[in-house]
Image: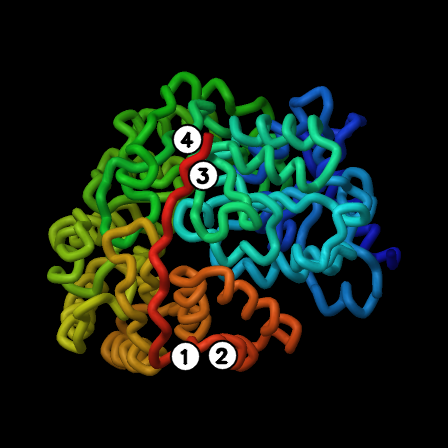
């Protein structure tokens, strides 16, 4: 490994607090298919690190997608773990956490940079690791992982991972391990189940919290802790709605506060509906009383009040961020969002009253039944809001996801999305900062969100060709999927296991 890459690992390790170094019979390479700064901001990844290392028979050592993958390729060095600095191929088990559809390219490249064939069909049970996957993607549609994963843990994995490890230890052959895992109700084994998925697991191990604190993350030096898990709301587009995850489970205020370690400077409260916690204002104020910076992963506009925003200000907030979701009142009703005009107007007033630098609003465009009139309503409404507070719009094209009421709704079209973005930009020029994500890559996300093993295999072909958008378009076209339309997909079923 070039000195500069080794130095990067050593520097990062030296700046971490909470890193685990140990020896155990079973070595697992806990791997994230995005760079270190993203991975170490993932509470789920950190939780799995602690769970695995909490076992006497297992040691988990971390590996990450390179910061600069082209530089890594030029160096011609195998990807290694941080704690052990061993190649991924030296580990009997690789455990990958996958958050969203467009990380699939990272899964492929991470495995191959580690000297492991990405396709399970090209791996040898005698010479290659067992590849286990899990993560947030399993709440919606993990079937594009089928060509690459030996087994997939579905849902909240804190409990399931122990049964998986015990099955891997108890059986000597690859086939016996697959057979054993296929009997677990929360483990999907593509070679045994096809595209019939296992059920999504729930865990009572709440709250999750950071094992490692480091300055070199997206959330620098922030201690992460769950304030709640799941959601009690029924937003029609959201994978984490109450029907998917069994509703919201609260962590007690006292337990949240007791977990924050001495020496922490910032605390991130994590969950799908953090601002719905009935004690959230008290929690934020208690942390601010300690002189800690506070960040929340989700703020709902109907929950923001003067005491709440005052507490956020005390916790270091300079930008008030919440969700507008749909560009018009009609579409917000269709999404079953509680964000009404009066709530968003109040957010602008609160942002001004508490001297926030910006009110940032997230919304989607390209929604079912959306028209230019909806966009024009957004322009008029945001223009009025901008008279009360500086506005920034974070805009994402709508992508329909499995396990939601808006599943199967067709993709709006790249040109339609781009035209509506341009309509927003022109209408709000000089009034709001418009920051969209790519319509092209949103279409790739849509194909994978609605696709299956064939679409996953097409991503492999696209990555091999260079990973440009045109490579994806050609690979999808080869299996009959084009931006203007797609083949009907089969409905997924859930396997019934013993």
Q: Depth check: 29 or 12 in front? A: 29
Check disc 1: other Cα within 10 Å, few if <14, some if 14-19, many if 20+: some
Mark sitting earlier along the chain (3/1): 3
Residue 350 on image: x %, y %: 23, 47
Question: Which residue position holds label 1?
Answer: 482
Q: CA distance from mark 3 to mark 1?
A: 31 Å
| In the displayed structure image, the side of residue 13 where residue 326 appears, left or right | left
Label 4 sits on a secondary structure element that is: loop
Residue 262 on image: x %, y %: 58, 22
Mark sitting earlier along the chain (1/4): 4
Q: Depth check: 432 or 80 in front? A: 80
Quarter holding the N terminus?
bottom right
Q: Depth check: 58 or 477 in front? A: 477
Question: Which residue position holds label 4?
Answer: 202
Marks 1/4 in contact by CB < 8 Å: the verdict is: no
Residue 473 badge: 2
Residue 387 on image: x %, y %: 20, 64
Question: Which residue position holds label 3?
Answer: 155
| In the displayed structure image, the side of residue 484 where residue 337 appears, left or right | left
Marks 3/4 in contact by CB < 8 Å: the verdict is: yes
């Amino acid at each position: 490994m070039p000195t500069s890459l080794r130095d990067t690992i050593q520097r990062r390790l030296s700046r971490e607090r909470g890193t685990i170094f140990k020896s155990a019979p079973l070595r697992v390479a806990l791997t994230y298919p995005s760079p270190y700064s993203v991975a170490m901001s993932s509470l789920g990844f950190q939780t799995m690190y602690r769970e695995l290392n909490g076992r006497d028979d297992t040691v988990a050592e971390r590996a990450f997608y390179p910061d600069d993958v082209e530089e890594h390729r030029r160096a011609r060095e195998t990807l290694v773990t941080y704690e052990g600095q061993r190649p991924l191929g030296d580990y009997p088990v690789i455990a990958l956490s996958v958050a969203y559809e467009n990380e699939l390219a990272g899964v492929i490249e991470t495995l191959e940079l580690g000297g492991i064939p990405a396709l399970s069909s090209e791996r040898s049970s005698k010479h290659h690791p067992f590849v286990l996957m899990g993560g947030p993607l399993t709440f919606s549609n993990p079937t594009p992982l089928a060509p690459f994963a030996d087994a997939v843990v579905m849902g909240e994995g804190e409990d399931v991972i122990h049964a998986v490890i015990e099955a891997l230890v108890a059986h000597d052959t690859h086939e016996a391990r697959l057979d054993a895992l296929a009997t677990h109700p929360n483990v999907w084994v593509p070679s045994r189940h096809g595209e019939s998925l296992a059920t999504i697991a729930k865990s009572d191990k709440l709250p999750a919290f950071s094992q490692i604190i480091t300055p070199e993350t997206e959330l620098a030096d922030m201690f992460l802790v769950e304030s709640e898990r799941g959601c009690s709301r029924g937003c029609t587009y959201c994978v984490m709605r109450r029907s998917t995850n069994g509703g919201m489970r609260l962590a007690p205020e006292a337990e949240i506060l007791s977990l924050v370690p001495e020496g922490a400077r910032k605390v991130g409260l994590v969950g799908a509906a953090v601002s719905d916690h009935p004690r959230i204002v008290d929690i934020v104020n208690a942390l601010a009383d300690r002189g800690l910076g506070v960040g929340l992963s989700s703020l709902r506009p109907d929950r923001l009040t003067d005491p709440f925003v005052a507490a956020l200000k005390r916790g270091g907030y300079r930008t008030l961020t919440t969700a507008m979701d749909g560009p018009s009142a009609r579409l917000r009703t269709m999404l079953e969002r509680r964000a009404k005009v009066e709530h968003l107007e109040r957010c602008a007033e609160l942002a001004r009253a508490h001297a926030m630098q910006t009110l940032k609003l997230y919304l989607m465009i390209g929604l079912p039944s959306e028209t230019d009139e909806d966009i024009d309503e957004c322009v008029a409404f945001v223009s009025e809001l901008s008279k009360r507070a500086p506005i920034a719009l974070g805009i994402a094209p709508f992508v329909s996801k499995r396990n939601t009421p808006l599943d199967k709704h067709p993709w709006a079209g790249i040109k339609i999305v781009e035209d509506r973005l341009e309509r927003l930009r022109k209408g709000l020029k000089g009034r709001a900062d418009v920051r969209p994500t790519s319509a092209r890559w949103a279409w790739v996300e849509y194909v994978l969100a609605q696709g299956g093993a064939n679409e996953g295999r097409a991503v492999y072909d696209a990555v091999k060709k260079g990973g440009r958008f045109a490579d994806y378009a050609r690979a999808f076209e080869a299996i009959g999927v084009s931006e203007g339309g797609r083949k009907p997909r089969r409905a997924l079923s859930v396997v019934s296991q013993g």
